[in-house]
């Protein structure tokens, strides 16, 4: 039975007056939630206190999420253990859920109203928060109303309302994750686990050792540094023809019939700590089975047309190939999905770029499928509103140039959500350095250009906390030479360049 009041004596229930006023309070909360979408969306230019409260939204929203989910869980467990659905316990949790939802929803509204958030996704997320607040408030009111009516049919109303609230909560949370991490935040791992049906697997009798096995291994582990856009060491590994050519070392990656003379095999067998080890430290290396297959392929002539099924019974390499096939098929599917997703995002960003008057192109210098953004000249207005238009795609940016734009320290809060950002060019902007601590979260940021900004000397010290920053352009700022020398002394690994530097 789903009766939330069973096995509890009537003496355990709150008094009728408490229930009546509690229900009135919940209905008033419903009116508050319905009012939120119609409140003014612009509260001034610099409402710092309101902006501070708004930015608490990502912190406080976790409380109502946990409370709502725990309440439903307690009610379900309570069918077996009565203590879990004691009326005072459940009512307390429901009321906490109502109050925390009010705080989270109001903070969310302030974030929208003070930070120039806009767009359909933001509006849907706001309405999701409103409906979640309505749901928990109505669930609480139903619980208070149904306390004297201890029959299971009416109890279904309470479970239905709370269940619907949980579903809305889940969808709203998904929208919030999309705003913060990008459109593929949840769908990408699901797509990898359950590939689309139209990704057709190649029959094993048609699979070739080089094209389907060797090339897939190299694509996953080596091509991010040895492709048409980034040819590290002068070595291109996109085709067998290129593998047979010598790189800057003067040695060919592949010498058919001779693994010991093949530079590829020499590099993968070097100690991981060696500078010439391939792949470099910090990147996924080849497994023992992958190395064995590469060595066998090279030793037997590095053929382009050898079929896999002819090797399955080979006592030397057959079992190794069979063991690799599941991972190879998964890698092939993943690469297909990644490329299709990247092309889709590229089309969407091209439309947005045209509307905003900026350039967004694939970042040819990046190891990943990411984009570079830069301003056109003369630049069009670009500040928080325009930046947040790109929020669902933040994870796709590795290089961003906002030189001579309208951004200030406040916009660094949003730029800090570009988790894959490696290069940031914000010269000739209004950056004073107050927002630099936001950027400490960027674990991949290597280049920063803050030339010709009103950078304050004290704020420049925040640069000491950047985890992997390698190069910073510091020309034309008010920061004195002694401060720059102090920065250099504390971070001798940091290249401080007193030049205007590149625009992108």
Image (cartoon, rainbow, N blue to C red):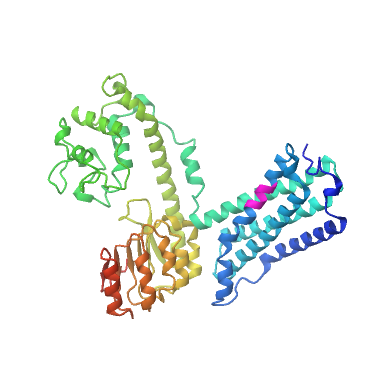
Q: What is the span of residues highlighted in magenta in the rendered image?
A: 66-71
Quadrant including the C terminus: bottom left
Q: Which residue is located at x 27 percent, y 30 percent?
A: 293
Q: In this view, does 217 lie to the left or right of 159?
A: left
Please indicate, yes or no, whether residue 455 appears anywhere in the rendered image. no
| Residue reaching furthest to the left | 250
Q: Which residue is located at x 16 percent, y 46 percent?
A: 247
Q: Is residue 488 above or below residue 304?
A: below
Quadrant for residue 50, please give it. Answer: bottom right
- Percent x, y of residue 85: 75, 45
Q: In this view, does 118 lie above or below 196?
A: below
Near-viewer residue (147 or 329): 147
Near-viewer residue (498 or 461): 461
- Percent x, y of residue 317: 28, 24
Q: Which residue is located at x 41 percent, y 40 percent?
A: 334
449 in the magenta segment:
no
Q: Which residue is located at x 31 percent, y 69 percent?
A: 503
Please indicate, yes or no, whether residue 145 appears anywhere in the rendered image. yes
Quadrant including the N terminus: top right
- Percent x, y of residue 449: 33, 69
- Percent x, y of residue 94: 72, 53
Q: Is residue 354 above or below residue 85?
A: below
Quadrant for residue 52, please give it. Answer: bottom right
Near-viewer residue (94 or 348): 94
């Amino acid at each position: 039975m789903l009766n939330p009041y069973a096995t509890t004596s009537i003496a355990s229930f709150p008094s009728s007056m408490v229930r009546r006023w509690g229900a009135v309070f919940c209905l008033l909360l419903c009116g508050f939630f319905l009012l939120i979408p119609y409140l003014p969306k612009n509260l001034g230019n610099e409402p710092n206190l309101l902006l501070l409260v708004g930015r608490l939204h990502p912190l406080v929203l976790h409380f109502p999420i946990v409370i709502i989910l725990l309440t439903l869980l307690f009610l379900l467990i309570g069918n077996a253990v009565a203590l879990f659905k004691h009326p005072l316990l459940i009512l307390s949790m429901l009321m906490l859920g109502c109050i925390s939802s009010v705080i989270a929803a109001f903070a969310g509204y302030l974030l929208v109203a003070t930070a120039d958030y806009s767009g359909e996704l933001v509006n849907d997320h706001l309405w999701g928060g409103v409906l979640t607040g309505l749901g928990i408030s109505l669930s609480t009111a139903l619980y208070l109303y149904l306390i004297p009516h201890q029959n299971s049919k009416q109890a279904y109303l309470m479970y239905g309302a709370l269940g619907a609230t949980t579903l809305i909560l889940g969808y709203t949370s998904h929208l919030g994750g999309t705003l913060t991490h990008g459109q593929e935040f949840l769908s990408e791992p699901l797509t990898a686990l359950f590939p689309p049906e139209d990704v057709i697997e190649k029959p094993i009798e048609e699979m070739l050792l080089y094209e389907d096995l060797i090339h897939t291994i190299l694509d996953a582990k080596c091509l991010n540094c040895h492709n048409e856009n980034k040819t590290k060491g002068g070595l291109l590994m996109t085709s067998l023809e290129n593998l047979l050519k010598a790189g800057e070392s003067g040695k060919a990656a592949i010498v058919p019939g001779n693994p010991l003379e093949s530079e590829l095999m020499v590099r993968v067998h070097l100690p991981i700590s060696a500078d010439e080890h391939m792949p470099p430290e910090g990147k996924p290396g080849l497994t023992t089975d992958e190395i064995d297959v590469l060595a066998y392929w090279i030793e037997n002539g590095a053929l382009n047309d050898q079929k896999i099924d002819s090797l399955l019974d080979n006592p030397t390499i057959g079992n190794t190939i069979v063991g690799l096939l599941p991972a190879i098929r998964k890698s092939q599917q993943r690469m297909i999905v990644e490329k299709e997703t990247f092309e889709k995002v590229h089309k969407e960003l091209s439309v947005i770029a045209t509307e905003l008057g900026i350039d967004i192109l694939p970042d040819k210098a990046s190891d990943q499928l990411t984009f570079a953004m830069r301003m056109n000249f003369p630049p069009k207005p670009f500040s928080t509103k325009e930046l947040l238009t790109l929020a669902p795609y933040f994870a796709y940016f590795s290089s961003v140039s906002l030189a001579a734009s309208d951004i200030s320290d406040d916009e660094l809060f949003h730029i800090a959500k570009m988790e894959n950002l490696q290069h940031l060019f914000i010269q000739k902007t209004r950056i004073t350095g107050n927002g630099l601590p936001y950027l400490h979260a960027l674990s991949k940021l290597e280049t920063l250009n803050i030339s010709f900004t009103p950078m304050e000397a004290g704020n420049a010290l925040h640069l000491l906390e950047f985890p992997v920053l390698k190069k910073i352009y510091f020309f034309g700022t008010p920061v004195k030479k002694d401060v720059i020398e102090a920065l250099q002394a504390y971070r001798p690994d940091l290249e401080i360049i007193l030049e205007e530097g590149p625009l992108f």
